[in-house]
Amino acid sequence: MKVTLIKPNIGRMEDRAYIDEGRMEPLNLGVLAALTPAHVEVVMYDDRMESIPYDEPTDLVAITVETYTARRSYEIADEFRARGVPVILGGIHPTFLPHEAAEHADSLYLGDAETQWAQVIDDVSHRQLKPIYRAPTGKPQPGTLTRRDIYRGKGYLPISLVQFSRGCRFACSFCAVTRYFDRQQFYRDVKEVVAEIESQPRRLIFFVDDNINSYPELSLKLYRELKSLKIRWVSQSTIDMTADPALMDAMLESGCLGHVVGFESIDPRNLKQMRKASNLPRWEKYGRQLSILREYGLQTWAAFLLGYDYDTPASIRDTLDFALTNKFTFAAFNILMPYPETPLYRTLETEGRLLYDGKWWLHPDYRFNHAAFVPKSCTPEELTQACWEARSRFNSLGSLVRRALDFKTNMRSPVRFATYLNFNPIFRKEVFKKQGMRFGVH
C-alpha cells in the first residue's frame, strides 16, 4: 500500500510558475508520515518546488489545506480524482468549511491527525474510506517523532521545525487558530520534544508554536532542558513575555535568538478592536517592552496587521517608521485578512464589507497581498498600496544594510549576524516575488 502526501503551492505569478525559495519543511506532513504504519510506503511531493506526478500509482492522496492554498489544493485534488485516485483533505480550512472542501475530496479529515489517522490507513487498505473523519484537538504527537526522511533533497531552508504546543489562549478576533482550538493550548511532553531535537542533526530550530510563552511555568520546563542541548532556536511569542525576568533569562540561556512577535498595531484603539489583550497593559507604544528585548539581544520579526478601523495610509507610514527606527531583524506588513469562521469575518459579512463574494481564497480575480474587504478609513486600493509601499521600503537594500548595523541585536554575536545575513536576502526576495500573485495555476 502507498500513500502520497502533497504540500500545495499558493499559486503562480502572471508570467511563470512560482518557486518558493524561502520554503521550510512541511512539519505537518512529517507528522502524518510518522503516524502512518511502517508497512505502508509514504512519498511526499512539494508543489512549491517540484512537479506532482499525477500518473504515479498510489492508493491515497492526502492534502493539508490552508486558506491561502485552498484553490491550488482543490486543483491538485481534482487532477488525482479524475484519474480515479481517492483524495482526503484535512486541515483548519476544511474543518471550517467542510461543504466547500467536500466538492473536491472523497474524504475529509476534520481535526487533529493523531487520534484517527491510523484508522484512515486501515480503511483505505480495506477499500472502506469513510466520507468524513472527525477528531478532537489535543496533545501534539504523543509518542511520535516527526519523520524527516521525506524532506531529503527538496532544498528546504537549514532550520528544523519542531512543535512544543498547539493553540493559543487569547481571543483575537482575526485569528483562525483561536477559533479552531477554542482558546485552548495543548502541550507536548518536554522529554519528547528533547528526543525529537536529538533525533535530527540541525542545531537551528524553529518552534512553530503560536505562542510558546503563553504559560510561562510550562515554557520554563522546556527551556531548562534545552540549555544542555546547545542549540539555537526561534519561535513565536506575545510581547508580554518581557514582564517576566525569570522567563527572559531562561530563554536566553536555552539558546533563544528571538521571536516572531505580533505587534499588530501601534494604535491602542485598533488593539482594543481586535482584542489583542496581551499588547495593551501598561501601553507605552511598546517602548519598555522593546527596550527589554534589546537588553537581552533578542532579534525580532515584527508582525503588523493593517486595515483595522483606525488605519489610514498615513498611520501605515507611521508603522513603517516605527519598524525602521527599531531596526527589527524582519518585519511583515500584513493586510488584515478575513479568514472564514473568525469573528472578524462574521463582522465584515454582517456589515456588507467583504469583497470577492466573500470567498477571496477561491476568487479568480483576487491577488496575494491585496485587500479583500472595504476598510473604514481608506479604500481597499489605498490599503493595498500603503502596505506594499511599507514592504518595499522596509526590504530595500538601504534598509537591509542600516538594520544590520544594530550592535545590540543583529550584530551582538557572530551567530546572530549570520542569521540576519543568511535569511534576510531570501525573505526580501520572496516579498517582491509574491506580491500580486494569483491563487491556483488554472
Image (cartoon, rainbow, N blue to C red):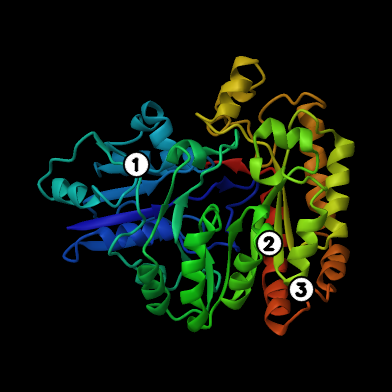
For residue 61, the mark is none
Q: Amino acid at mark 2?
A: Phe
- Binning the other alpha carbons within 10 Å of mark 2 as few (below 14), some (14 to 19) or many (20 upward) gives some
> Does residue 160 appear in the picture of this structure?
no
Identify which residue, 112 or 124, lies in the foreground: 112
| Distance from Cα at disc 1 to Cα at disc 3 | 39 Å
Residue 333 place in picture, x, y as percent: 74, 47
Task: Check disc 2 and report its element: helix, strand or loop.
Answer: helix
Q: Amino acid at mark 1?
A: Gly
Question: Going 39% across and 35% down the picture, which residue do you hit?
Answer: 95
For residue 223, side relative to residue 356 (left or right)? left
Q: Nearer the viewer, mark 3 or mark 2?
A: 3
Residue with the mark numbered 1: 111
Q: Amino acid at mark 3?
A: Asn
Residue 215 place in picture, x, y as percent: 51, 55
Residue 414 place in picture, x, y as percent: 72, 84
Question: Going 77% across and 70% down the picture, which residue do you hit?
Answer: 295
- Please, which residue is most extreme toward the left here? 126
Residue with the mark numbered 2: 427
Q: Earlier in the sequence, mark 1 or mark 3?
A: 1
For residue 371, side relative to residue 288 (left or right)? left
Task: Check disc 3 and report its element: helix, strand or loop.
Answer: loop
Identify which residue, 381 or 401, lies in the foreground: 401
Residue 345 place in picture, x, y as percent: 58, 26
Q: Nearer the viewer, mark 2 or mark 1?
A: 1
Q: Is residue 321 above or below residue 86?
A: below
- Binning the other alpha carbons within 10 Å of mark 1 as few (below 14), some (14 to 19) or many (20 upward) gives many
Which quadrant: the N terminus? bottom left
Q: Earlier in the sequence, mark 2 or mark 1?
A: 1
| Distance from Cα at disc 2 to Cα at disc 1 | 31 Å
| Distance from Cα at disc 3 to Cα at disc 2 | 16 Å
For residue 410, the mark is 3
